[in-house]
Amino acid sequence: MAVNVEFINPFIQGTQAILRDVCQEEAKLGKVHLKESPYMSDTVAIIIGITGDIKGQVIFSLGTGTACSIASKMMMGMPVSELDEMAKSAISELTNMILGNTATIFYNLGITIDITPPSLLMGQNIQISTNKMKTICLPLQLSGGATFEIDVSLQDNKK
């Protein structure tokens, strides 16, 4: 399957920039791979829909400990030992900022997208099915060995 790299790079760039600027976290891209539907997610998944010139969804997937660590960094280092409503709100806002940044990168490439508000899911063994779309996994390695996964399922709406 031919993957349009033009659609993938903005997600990587947008996420790395926000993690660096907001969380002082240098995220390094791991091995990009396809996921077969249905697939399992980590314990925290944030889903954001995309419409416009391209449509689909982006799912940010991370472990609870990683989510607590990122929420703490977003709240100026305040200790976060559990994902309470404030921590969930911080993580959701981070993904919103990431896709806002990504939308700007797309706009500069002549591609217009709109994003839906983030939906945060938590639980063990979350199973995700993407209807008829290939899912490309962009795993970002954070300091301390944690992984911040971006699962991108898109279709070109211009065709």
Image (spheres, grey):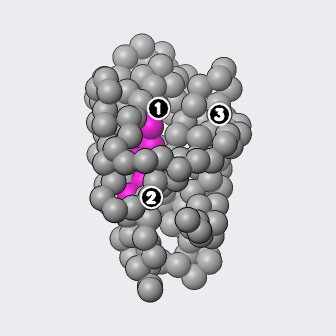
Q: Is residue 59 magenta?
A: yes
Q: Earlier in the sequence, mark 3 or mark 1?
A: 1
Q: Are marks 3 and 1 in contact (CB under 8 Å)?
A: no
Q: Which mark is residue 134?
A: 2
Residue at 63%, 66% in the rendered image: 5
What is the tally of numbered marks visible in this picture? 3
Residue 21 visible, this angle: no
User: Disc 2 residue type?
Assistant: Lys
Instruction: Say whether residue 42 is left or right of residue 2.
Output: left
User: Which of labels 2 and 1 is toward the front?
Assistant: 2
Q: Which mark is residue 47?
A: none
Spatial CA span between label 3 and label 1: 11 Å
Find residue 51 and report its image quarter: bottom left
Instruction: Say whether residue 17 is left or right of residue 101.
Output: right
Q: Which mark is residue 62?
A: 1
User: Which of labels 2 and 3 is toward the front?
Assistant: 2
The range drawn in magenta is 57-61
User: Disc 3 residue type?
Assistant: Gln
Depth order, front residue of 147/70:
147
